[in-house]
Each structure stands twice: as C-alpha cells, then as structure tokens.
Amino acid sequence: MNVFEEYQMRTLQSSTRRHFLKKLTTGLGGIALGSMLGCQTRSDAQLPEGLEELYTQLPHFAPKAKRIIYLHMAGAPSQLELFDYKPELKKLNGQDCPPSLLEGKKFAFIQGIPKMLGPQADFKSRGQSGMMVSDHLPHFASIVDEVTLVKTMHTDEFNHAPAQLLLQTGSPRLGRPSMGSWVTYGLGSENDNLPGFMVLVSGGKTPDAGKSVWGSGFLPSVYQGVQCRSEGDPVLYVSNPDGMDGQLRRQTIDAINSINEKEYMEFGDPETLTRISQYEMAFNMQTSVPEIMDIKDEPEYIHEMYGTEPGKTSFANNCLLARRLVEKGVRFVQLFDWGWDMHGVSENESLDVGLEKKCRLVDRPMTALVKDLKQRGLLEETLVVWGGEFGRTPMQENRGGREWPFKGRDHHTEAFPVWMAGGGVKGGFTYGETDEIGYYGIKDKVHVHDLQATILKLMGMDHEKFTYFAQGRDFRLTDVSGKVIEKVIA
Amino acid sequence: MEQSSDIIIFFGRFHPLFLHLPIGFLALAFLMELISKREKFNYLRPAVGFVLALGAISALVTAVLGLMLAQAGDYGEDLLFIHQWAGIILVVLAFSTWFLYYKKSQKETKVLNQAYLASISLMMLFLGGAGHFGGSLTHGSNYLTQYMPDGLKTLAGIPIENRGPQLIENLDEAVVYTEIIHPIMEIRCNSCHNSSKKKGDLQMHTKEALLKGGENGPVFVAGSPEESELIKRLHLPENHDDHMPPKGKSQLTDDQVLLMEWWIENGATFDKKVAEVEANDEVQSVLLTLTDPNAHKTEVEILLAEGTSIPDAEKLKAYREEGIMIKTLSNDENWLQVTLDKTDPVDEILGRLAADFPDQITWLDVKDTPLSDEGMEHIGKFKNLTKLRSEKTEITDAGLDHLKGLNYLESLNIYGTVISDEGLLALEGLKNLKRLYVWDTQVSQNGAAQLQEASNQLEVNLGYEVQVVDSLTVKVVPVAIRE
C-alpha cells in the first residue's frame, strides 16, 4: 500500500467542482502570471522521455488484436435495410408517425409529422448463428459466423461531420487526435518503412469532417494518418522530380536532418523530431509505398475475390490495399467510403436504388477482406470494424415538408449497427437489442465511447490510463466516459 | 410545548461542545494525583481538589445537556441507554471523588485514602466508557476498528470479516440469497445501505430491510426484474444520477447483474437452494464460475493467467540491442513475444533464445524468414508456446515433428510452405491446437479432415472457397488440393 498515493487519491476524491471553481479565482491569476513570466509547459522538450515512460507501461493487457482495419461508411448506411430486421415496421409502413416518437426530438431534415417507412429489403437468417442479414449483402451473409454485430450503437451528434469526429476522435469538435493516431502513438509501428497509420478514401469525396478525422490533434504530427491514393502517385510528392536521383535525395535529406538536429538541440521542440523522422520515413516510402500500392502483382483469383481493378480508385482496391498494408505491419488502416447518405432526394441517394448500388460496391470486397485475412492467419490478430457514424430513422424523410419520389431516411442517433471481425471478438454473435421499429436500443446500449474503449482494450490498452498531457490537462480518446463491452470479447 | 422542546434540543446540541471539558479536567486530575506521588511533584497535590471540582461541575453540566440532546430521538436506544447511565454514574463518581478528596485533606485516614483511590480509578473507568459509547453513538460502533490493519485485528481479537462472494463448494445445495446474492450486495451495496447508514432511507443488509424498501419504494418486484428498481438502476448509464452503485464506486460485473436478475426473476426467495431454482444456460454457465473460477477457461488461458518466471533482464537487453523484437505481452506479465525479420539468421537466434527463455516465450513470429527444420528443432523447446507464425518459410514435414511436445500450442500458421499430409500427422497429439493455416501447401482436404477428426476444436483453414454467385458474382477456384 502506497500511503502517499492513497492520501492524494482521497484528497482528489473529496474536492468537488465547487472547490475547484472557488480556488480558480486566485488560481487564474497564478496561471496568467506563470505564462507572463515565460514558464515552460510540461510538454516542451520532455516528450521523448515521456514517450519512453509510456512505452514501459504499454500495453496494459496482452493484446488480442495487433492491427486494425476500420471500414468507415461515411454518410451512415441504413441499419433497417442491412442489419436490423424489423417485421413490425413493415406493418406500420405508410402510417403517420405517432407523436410520442417525435416529442423533444431534433432531426436534420424531417419536419412536421412524417410517415413510417417499412424495411426496403428482405432479410434471411444466415450462417450457423442465424444472424438476420439483408439480401443486399449476399457476400457478407457467408461470413456472419466470423462476426460480432453490435446493433445498439448510439451517438450524440446527428450531423455527419460532428458525428464522424465523435466516432473517430472521441469529440464532436475539431482538435482531438483520431483513434488511429492514439493507437500508433501508444503502440508504434511494426514497419520502419511505412507510416503506422494509413488512410484510404473511396466514394468520390473525403468524409464531411475533412482530414481532421485522421488528424493527430495535439499528439505529435508524426502520428497523423497518411492518406494514400490508389490512382497516380499513391502519396503526393513522394516520388523524385525529374533530374533528381536517389543519391542526391539522400544527401539532401542528410543535410536537412543535421540542420534540424541542431535546431532541436537549441529549442527542444518535439515537432522538430517529428520533422526529422518524417524526412526519413518519406525517403523510405519512396520505394516501399509504390511497391505496396501496386496491386498488379496479385494473382488473378485475388482480384476475382475482391473485385479489384488495378489503377482505379475503388473501395475494392482499398480493401485489398488494406490487407497488403496490415500484412506489412501497418498498425491502423482507416478506410472511408463516401456515399451512404440515403435521404431519398435523388436516385443515387435513395433506399430503393442508391443503397443497393452502394452495397454491390462494398459487399464483395469487405467479405473478401475478412476471408483473405483469415486464410493468411491474419484475422486472429487483426480487428476489422465496419460501420457508419450514426443510423437512420424508421420514418421516411419528408424534407421541405413534401413527399419525394424516392424513399429515404433521415439521420438518427439512437440506434445503428457496427460489426467487428477477428482481433479477439466473438464470431456469429449479436450484441444488443433494439425496439420493434429499430428506433431505440432497449438492451445493452453501446455508446461511441464504449466502442472506442473496447477497441483500445482489444489492442491491449486501458482507455482510462492511456492519456496524453496537453493544454494543461490529461486527455484520453474516450474523454471522461466509455465502458469496455466485455461480452463481445472472445 | 413545541417551543420548549426545541429550546431543549438547542441547548442539547451544546453537549458535544461541553463534553470535552470533564474529559480534560478529570483526566488531568487523575494524572496530577498520579505524578504528585513522586516527591519532586508533590507541590501539585493541593491543586488536585480544584481540578476535580472543575471536572465534577463540568461533568454535571455535560450530563444535563446530554439528557436534553437525547430528547431529539436521533440515536439508537440501546447504545444511548448505556452511554446515558455511564455518564450519570460518572457524575456521581466525580462528585464523590471530590468529596473524598476534601475529607481526606481535612483528616487523612487509611480507609479514606483507599476509598479515594478506588473512587478516582472507577471514575476514570467510567470516563473512558462514557466517552467511548458516546463516540460510538455518533460515528458508529465500528468507527475505530473499521480500518484497522488485519494483523492488528487478529491481535486484538476482532474477527476479520470475510465479506463478498466466496467460492461455493456445493453449488446445488447453496442457498441462492445467502451464498450468492447477499455476498454481492455486501461488497457493492452495503457500504451505503447498512444498519447505521441508510442513504435514500434504504437498508440492504438483511432480508427484512430489503423487503421494506426505501424512500423510492420497494427494492424489487419479485418475478419481474424489468420492474424492479434495483435492476433498473443497475442498467442505467453510469453517468446517470440514479445509477447504482454511484459513478466512481466499484461496479457489479455483467455476470453479477445477471445473477441479480435471475434471483428476482425467480421470485427473489430467501431460502431456496440453487437446485430448486430454474436457470437457463447463460445463468448455469455463470453459476459454474462460482464453484470454479476457471470453469470456462481453456488450458491455455489458465496457463497464461498463471504466469511464468521473470526473464533475465540483462539477456533481454542484449537481444534488443541486437535489434531483435522481443518484449513482454503486457506490462505486468513475464510472457514474451518474439518477432524475427527475414534478414535475421533465424535458426541461430532461435537456438540462443531456446537456451535463454525456454519457459517464457509464448508468441513467436518467424513468418517470411529463412526458417528451416533446424530452427524448428529449437522452437520445439519453447514448451509454453501458444502461437506460432511460421508461414512462408523453408520448413518441411520433418520440421513439424519437433512440435510434438508443444502441448499449449493453440494457433499454428504454416501456409505457403511445402508441408504435406504426412507432416500434419505430427500435430495429432496437440490437444489445445485450435487454428491451423495450411493454405497454399501440399496438404489435401483429406489430410486436413483426418487431423480435424482427431480433435473436435481444431479448425483447419485450407484457403479459398469463395462461392456466392451474384450481386456481382464470384466463384474463386479453390486453391487447396482437392482429392
């Protein structure tokens, strides 16, 4: 028993917010004085030591997963057409939404009293586990026994950008490090020639929240996601310009690095270290990236499996690339696929046409990814996560108070699905139950922070202990909440 | 009338203030009496009477105030009775001691002397007693000993309470409430809901208290966990004000919540035994862990949980300086994981590792390296190896022979090697083997099936059989040799 620590704990426990605010009145002056006198903040110059200390504490648990592939369906796919089978809703189709469901609710577009909209897809029981999966996903149906389906995710934000930020960074506002940054910061990379956190985007647009969803926030920028393109140069400006050969490039980088080292000796800014390692990494990436991003050398049956076409930008290509990256030891591969926002305002944004089109582009490759990882023995140590940033309403969207020619659903925060495979989660397992119309979770609700806590746990980290000191306090991915869902862990 | 009783309590509340005076004075008088026996201090003796007088008078005032305070009725009656009479006797003893002192100073006799000594000693005894019971009255009777270290408790003869869930020996005969439910409440509820502390006017330490409920009504509705306040609150989000136990306190595990629900579902009985209560599979499996915590753990999980000896730090450091990735599975474990690179002299390094850490290495990753059968011989010495990634290496059937003794091996990856059915024979005795990856080898479907037959938990992965035709069709040709 450490008496001093216990004393500290008890003191902290007994000081309330009120105490804090009371003390703040004098404290603020002190803080101001401190900065006027030019006090150093803790993060300055001590970072490398801090990191060393961190690495002696991590991982907190033996990891179940060593790597993550996160398939983020930006725009939020409809749970009611894919994973959440609601026959009751079918019966209510076309009826006015009861006011009890609308009271005190805010929607992005729904106005007045909308009509209920039955499921726009048929479902069947799949695999040994009998998981109900929509006919839109015939390929996925063959891997349900590898998958844990969480049906009761919920979030705090009903617009894309803040919801994506909340899911990926733990906060709906800009400025926090993304999950991939946290993980690579905590566990490092297994490959010196590739960034630990790589991002691949498909669907024609980057996510609504922009590149902040893979930003490093206040963590050193070496941990931010590196976006790769599957068309043209995989990483912009990584190849040598005409007239510059590898040798000359090496000498240039050596010279720049030695200047930067002097700079660091003088000012101790950790961002200088980031810059040095980024130059090194960029040099290594000149050979490693083109090599890994070139999927032409994959055998024909692999292309058939994924539905890949070398040289194009597609979710399929990105899935195959994701496998190649984790095979090389990349810690966190983040895929974003844009175009799931089925409001029903046009053919491509509708449940009757657009959704099926989208599913066709995604179903085969995501299934191939799980199967391919499995036969390589990688699935047991790689966590695959699939999901959007929120769910969709059981009511039909009536934007502008009118009826639309296509069927669509509005944004909905209270219930949406996420599935996970490999990396220490159960197979053929469904967690959580939603009500009869898929509006609310009624059993085992999972908040976005709970999912983050669970992912960190699978990677061997305790989300409450894994912190970073910035702007005067310790931060964590899960902010001040989050509970590990032990039941999904195999 | 009401007015007067209020004023009584107003004065009564000065009792805790005044009571320190007689304690101080009387103890001081006793102390002075004691040390004035020594010649050096006998000048103190004349003052003892004065101090005793002060003590007796202040004791009287305190006692009166105490009697007034007792009118408030805030205190447990049994303890109050003892405290009250101990206090009254103390006042009497204080005055009689003072009186005897006065008599004695006028004319000292042996009898007077003895009576005085007896009186002052008794007075001290009652001073301690009245003080102690008074303290117990306000702070609770275990206030002093609650945080006493266990060792000291044993010395003092205070029983060390074994609270909380204990291992159950005979599950069927165990009474559900007494041996399963009550112990959970004991460690998770009773710190705020007990005989002396009743948050929300609720006590949960006995059957009667549970049945009585608190200010928000009954604790449970027998037969209906969904309607039971207890269960509702357990399920509220931890941030919710009504969640129990409150945020920051140790929470019930999911299993414990399940047991609570099961108990209420089945009528919340206080005398039924486990065997008399229906339990579904989920509950059954949780119940099993009450008799044996390892009930649902595999041999490998038990091994890893048991831990291993500390690896030699100097040697570890040397390997790391050599550039070899060797580290513990987690910060508080001694188990080691090793990853070797294709540029490493793998066989030679494995030879050294087998000599240095034969017990500790449990995860080994030598994929895509020039690993040969010689290296496999060394790998065979890692007797606690649970995961081996040796895909895309130069090993042959003969190499697999060395794995025969690896009883804890759970996952073996040998895809992309020249291994054939013959090699797999060596794996037949590995009873903990669960996952075997043999895609892109010489292994046939028959060979895989044969091995799978020998073990019911083994899953052999032979590679593709992606069939699903449509929604953009797919029919990848199976890669494994089919016969």
Image: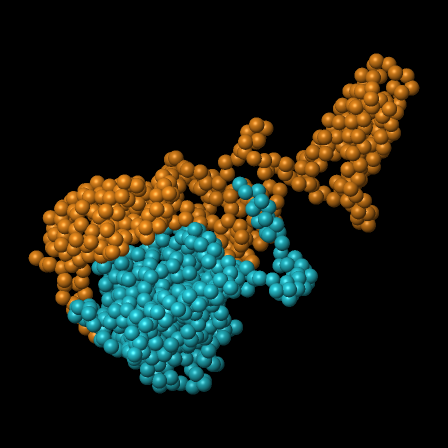
Is the residue A419 above or below the residue A296 in the image? above
| Most distant residue in the right direction | B106
Q: Residue at x 25, y 46 (%)?
A: B350
The answer to whether residue A479 is visible is: no
How far across and down, in percent of the image, does residue A203 sit? 33, 77
What shade does chain B have?
orange
> Quick check: can you spot residue A275?
yes
| Vertical position of residue B440 compared to residue B285: above or below | below
Q: Nearer the viewer, residue A16 or B314?
A: B314
**How far from the left and from the top, in percent, is residue B226?**
46, 56
How was the colour assigned to the protein in this rendering?
Answer: by chain
Residue at image coords 81%, 18%: B115
What residue sits 76% from the left and 23% below the top?
B121
Front in this rendered view, residue B184 or A161: A161
- Residue A259 vs residue B79, the one in the foreground: A259
Residue beneath the point at 18% across and 62% down: B464
Residue B138 vertical position relative to residue A151 in the rendered view, above or below: above
Q: The chain shown in cyan is which?
A: A
Indicate left or right for B440 with B211 as reference: left
Indicate the position of residue A462 as horizontal and vertical percent values. Answer: 44, 54
Question: Left or right of A178: which side holds B243?
Answer: right
Q: Quadrant of residue B428?
A: top left
**Residue A168 coordinates in the image, percent (x, y):** 42, 67
Against B163, is A46 above or below?
below
